[in-house]
Image: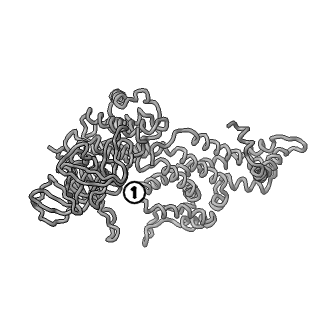
């Protein structure tokens, strides 16, 4: 049963006819208790606006928000018991770490003994037991964000909202802190919404991802589904690297497609399409192999155009017919890479050939 | 790099202009100090200071101006903080209008202000189209005149107080702190008293001390409203005495420097703004 429900949520900004902007359009999701759902998308797609509506900082133009079937749509932010972690940490500069964490408990008029105990628990949870008397300006960015997380969790909120909490941190800290956040969320079993524009972040920590674009939901699914079975061109392009090319249906019954005359076999059900239909075909670069390594359903002649080292990945640009494709392979110092200009063959399975909606 | 080597690295012409500027400021001050110490012929002493501070009118007018300054500061804070806070949080489109209003005291001279106040408040406040008097003219009783004085000083100090508060709020990202406090269950009173105000200490102090300096030295408003303020006292003293005004002028300078020193001390190390923007 859904714990947090957003039903038909829309948000419009601006009153006039000319500056009316629909930031969120008909957003629907049911989030289970203890689930971490990421809202993923580029800047301006409406993910933060949606989060702020759950927090109560924005009022939906239409739709309802409910926690355990209790409608909270029109409740003030300070009455929702929803914890929030901000991109800019938002620690109170005039209070120590301990006072920051205990602030919500003090507002709730908890006994001072209970506050002290809870603050101690939170400090231990974020591995900062010795930092209770420090002020925010004495902490690093990563430490400040951990304190912000502890502060949000101290009140045992019904839902935890995280608005790009790691954007202001450097790459290494981001990787370690996101794992910590996920571990704490799982340990406490708290329902959470995580807003990010970083697909790697979303995929590494989420139970499910909602990919958003221009205020609308493009696709909702597990990280595995989103990455391997994108249903729209936007999702396919936004999440991971993707070869997307124009093709046409050759034989719907056989799942046969063609790209500039080169035939591809796909596992996608093409029964609703007819021969000659124009389609958008997508194949992940890492789904290709060179035939010398392995042979799958589709065996395609190619010419090596370019080779790029990207660290752990080697990205090879090939021409299949007159169409450019990327082929990714793991970097290996003993890898026998082809040379630019060589003619070779690549292969990919039927399942790797996707057909997308525009 | 230590101080002496840093000083050695400063270019020659920078020193020239610095010394010229300092002389332009320090020489008249020194002349005032020197004059104030020569009340007794051929003796350097503090007789002028003693004479000035022993004058009962000095204590009366200084005490009055300090009291009015404190009331003006408190009322300005009560007016300015919620206004600046609300504009920053909910009405950013009103910011330009509010800033324009706070700049008006620079444009309207104090003499126009006081004539306007006298013109309006020297008549009784009545219900329109009736003879029912709600309040007698403020200029006819002492407390009423004091209200006018405080109101006038608030207007004169408004640009300084509002800008100090507004700058302070900008520095601490009031919007995000407010939302953070709301997400933790705080109401408006708690947010302002426990989150916003404590982080505006240095801004409030700057605004308060600037307002204090304005009130202490102000002459026009106090003269025309006929109140026993320090500014007119100093002006009148200058008509009849020579050394005591110099002593009091130098003392006022010292008080202003002390105020600036306090601002520096308070703003110099109490904590920094958190978060990235």
Snapshot quadrant of residue A36: top left
In the image, taking residue B128 as reference, residue A205 lies left or right, namely left
In the image, taking residue B165 as reference, residue B215 lies left or right, namely right
The disc numbered 1 marks a residue on which chain?
B
Given residues A250 and A122, the one toward you in this image is A250
Q: Which residue is mark 1?
A: B90
Snapshot quadrant of residue B117: bottom right
- Residue that protrudes farthest toward the right in the picture: B42
How many residues crowd mark 1 within 10 Å: few (<14), some (14–19), many (20+)? few
- Indicate the position of residue A101 as horizontal and vertical percent values: 38, 35
In the image, taking residue A2 as reference, residue B193 lies left or right, namely right
Given residues B104 and A332, the one toward you in this image is A332
Q: Is residue A206 visible?
A: yes
- Indicate the position of residue B124 as horizontal and vertical percent values: 51, 65
> Tag 1, which secondary structure?
loop
In the image, taking residue B39 as reference, residue B134 lies left or right, namely left
Given residues A277 and A335, the one toward you in this image is A335
* Numbered-mark total: 1
- Residue that protrudes farthest toward the bottom in the picture: B129
- Indicate the position of residue A126 as horizontal and vertical percent values: 36, 31
- Indicate the position of residue B254 as horizontal and vertical percent values: 71, 45
x 40%, y 36%: residue: A100
The colour mode here is: one colour
Q: Is residue B185 visible?
A: no
**Relative to B167, does residue A111 appear above or below in the rendering?**
above
Snapshot quadrant of residue A18: bottom left
x 56%, y 64%: residue: B104
Image quarter of the C terminus of chain A: bottom left
Image quarter of the N terminus of chain A: top left
Given residues A352 and A131, the one toward you in this image is A352
């Amino acid at each position: 049963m859904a714990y947090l429900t957003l039903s038909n949520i829309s948000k419009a900004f601006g009153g006039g006819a000319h500056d009316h902007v629909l930031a969120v359009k008909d957003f629907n999701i049911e989030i289970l208790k203890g689930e971490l759902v990421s809202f993923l998308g580029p800047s301006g797609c409406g993910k933060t606006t949606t989060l702020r509506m759950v927090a109560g900082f924005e009022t939906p133009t239409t739709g309802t928000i409910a926690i355990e079937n209790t409608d909270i749509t029109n409740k003030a932010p300070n009455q929702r018991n929803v914890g929030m972690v901000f991109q800019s940490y938002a620690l109170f500069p005039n209070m120590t770490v301990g006072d920051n964490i205990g602030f919500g408990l003090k507002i709730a008029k908890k006994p001072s003994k209970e506050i002290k105990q809870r603050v101690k628990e939170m400090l231990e949870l974020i591995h900062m037991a010795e930092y209770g008397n420090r002020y925010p300006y004495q902490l690093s960015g990563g430490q400040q964000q951990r304190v912000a997380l502890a502060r949000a969790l101290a009140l045992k909120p019904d839902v935890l909202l995280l608005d790009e909490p790691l954007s202001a941190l450097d790459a290494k800290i981001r990787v370690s802190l996101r794992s910590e956040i996920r571990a704490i969320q799982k340990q406490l079993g708290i329902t959470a919404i995580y807003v990010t524009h970083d697909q790697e972040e979303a995929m590494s920590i989420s139970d499910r991802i909602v990919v958003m674009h221009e205020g609308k939901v493009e696709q909702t699914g597990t990280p595995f589904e989103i990455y391997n079975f994108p249903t729209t061109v936007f999702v396919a392009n936004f999440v991971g690297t993707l070869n997307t090319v124009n093709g046409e249906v050759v034989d719907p019954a056989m799942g046969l497609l063609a790209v500039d005359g080169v035939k591809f076999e796909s596992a996608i059900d093409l029964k609703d399409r007819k021969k000659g239909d124009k389609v958008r075909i997508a194949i992940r670069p890492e789904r290709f192999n060179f035939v010398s390594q392995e042979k799958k359903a589709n065996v395609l002649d190619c010419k090596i155009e370019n080779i790029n080292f990207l660290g752990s990945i080697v990205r090879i640009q090939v021409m299949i017919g007159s169409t450019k494709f990327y082929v990714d392979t793991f970097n290996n110092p003993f890898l026998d890479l082809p040379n630019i200009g060589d003619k070779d063959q690549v292969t990919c399975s039927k399942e790797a050939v996707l057909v997308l909606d525009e | 790099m230590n101080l002496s080597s840093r000083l050695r690295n400063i270019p020659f012409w920078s020193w020239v202009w610095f010394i010229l500027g300092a002389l332009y400021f320090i020489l008249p001050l020194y002349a005032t100090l020197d004059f104030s110490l020569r009340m007794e012929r051929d003796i350097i002493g503090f007789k002028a200071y003693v004479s000035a501070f022993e004058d009962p009118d000095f204590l009366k007018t200084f005490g009055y101006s300090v009291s009015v300054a404190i009331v003006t500061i408190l009322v300005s804070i009560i007016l300015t903080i919620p206004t600046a806070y609300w504009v920053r949080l909910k009405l950013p489109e009103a910011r330009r209008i509010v800033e324009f209003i706070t700049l008006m005291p620079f444009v309207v001279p104090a003499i126009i202000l006081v004539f306007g106040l006298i013109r309006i408040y020297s008549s009784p406040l009545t219900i329109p189209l009736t003879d029912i008097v709600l309040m007698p003219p403020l200029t006819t009783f002492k407390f009423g005149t004091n209200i006018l004085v405080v109101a006038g000083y608030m207007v004169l100090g408004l640009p300084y107080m509002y800008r100090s508060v507004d700058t302070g709020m900008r520095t601490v990202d009031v919007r995000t702190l407010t939302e953070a406090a709301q997400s933790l269950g705080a109401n408006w009173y708690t947010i302002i008293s426990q989150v916003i105000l404590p982080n505006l200490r240095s801004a409030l102090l700057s605004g308060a001390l600037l307002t204090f300096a304005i009130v202490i030295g102000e002459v026009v408003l106090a003269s025309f409203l006929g109140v026993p303020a320090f500014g007119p006292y100093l002006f009148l003293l200058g008509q009849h005495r020579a050394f005591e005004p110099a002593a009091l002028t130098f003392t006022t300078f010292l008080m202003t420097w002390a105020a600036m020193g306090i601002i520096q001390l308070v703003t110099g190390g109490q904590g920094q703004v958190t978060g990235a923007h």
